[in-house]
Amino acid sequence: MTGHPNSNWACGLGAELLRHFSGYSVLGILAFSALVPWFVANFLGWPDTADQLSATENIKAFWALATSIAIVATFAGSYLVTRESYYGTLRRSVVMSGLVHLVAVKYAAALVVGLATLAAGILAWGASVAFTLPPELRVELLTPESWRALPGVVLSSAVGSLWGCSLGWIIRHYYATTIVTMLIPLAIELPVLANDPEIGRWLPSGALAGIASLPFEGLLQPGPAFLVSLAWLLAASAGVVGVLKRKEF
């Protein structure tokens, strides 16, 4: 690819986003962004217990469950790589763009896609859960006090999307990466986090939960949790470098 670097960057990022949002797969990701919070909600017994909690506790529960959309953001970040690997177009993209440029663009696109997934998920999850909540609680969820939890939730999804992109580059197999990004967090890490947070807080999902200050006993505070997530990201980045040096496309 030739031309001005900024132009190449913008074109590459635009192409990645267009590829992601123009297919039917984005509808599936949107559906998961609403279904995953419901799955976690059923696991934790909310909103069935909403009438037994205070307004503050219910607000914390809502945003805690919204944080689980980070799992979907992780998958969405990985999908930018695994989709091309699945369809056999990754080698062509490497040849056309250059490996370093393509990796950087996909990471940037993963961040955008992860945040878009979170925004859509909060709207879909919030709209669906609103019908099960008392009217006064719906009003409380829209207050500025409630939205103070949003930055931590955003940061969790942002980190998750970059983590997912790394896993996509390392594994480069659609089904295997889906298991690692979605099934393992829901089937293994979530139960560990709920039952043994002293261990769960060091796992990728537990660190993301700590960043968002989820109301679980034993989680790390947001600062240390971010450092744990950063350590996972750096380890994954080292894995990406090692894999890309060894593998041919």
Image (cartoon, rainbow, N blue to C red):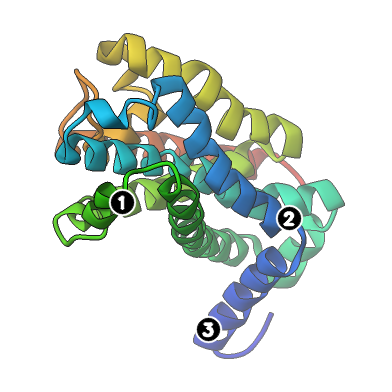
Q: Residue 147 lies in what quarter of the image?
A: bottom left
126 or 152, which lies in front? 126
Marks 1 and 2 sit apart, C-alpha to C-alpha, by 34 Å
**Residue 93: % across, % down:** 75, 64
Which type of secondary structure does the marked residue at label 3 adopt? Answer: helix
Answer whether labels 1 and 3 touch (C-beta < 8 Å). Answer: no
Q: Amino acid at mark 2?
A: Ser
Q: Earlier in the sequence, mark 3 or mark 2?
A: 3
User: Is any part of residue 72 visible from this angle?
Assistant: yes
User: Is any part of residue 226 visible from this angle?
Assistant: no
Relative placement, left or right, of 144 versus 231 is: left
Q: Amino acid at mark 1?
A: Pro
Marks 1 and 3 sit apart, C-alpha to C-alpha, by 52 Å
Mark 2 = which residue?
25
45 over 119 or under it: above or below? above
Residue at image position (46%, 29%) is: 40
Which type of secondary structure does the marked residue at label 2 adopt? Answer: helix
Q: Amino acid at mark 3?
A: Pro
Q: Residue 172 lies in what quarter of the image?
A: top right
Q: Nearer the viewer, mark 1 or mark 3?
A: 1
Residue at image position (43%, 41%) is: 132
Mark 3 = which residue?
5
Q: Residue 96 lies in what quarter of the image?
A: bottom right
Mark 1 = which residue?
135
Answer whether labels 1 and 2 touch (C-beta < 8 Å). Answer: no
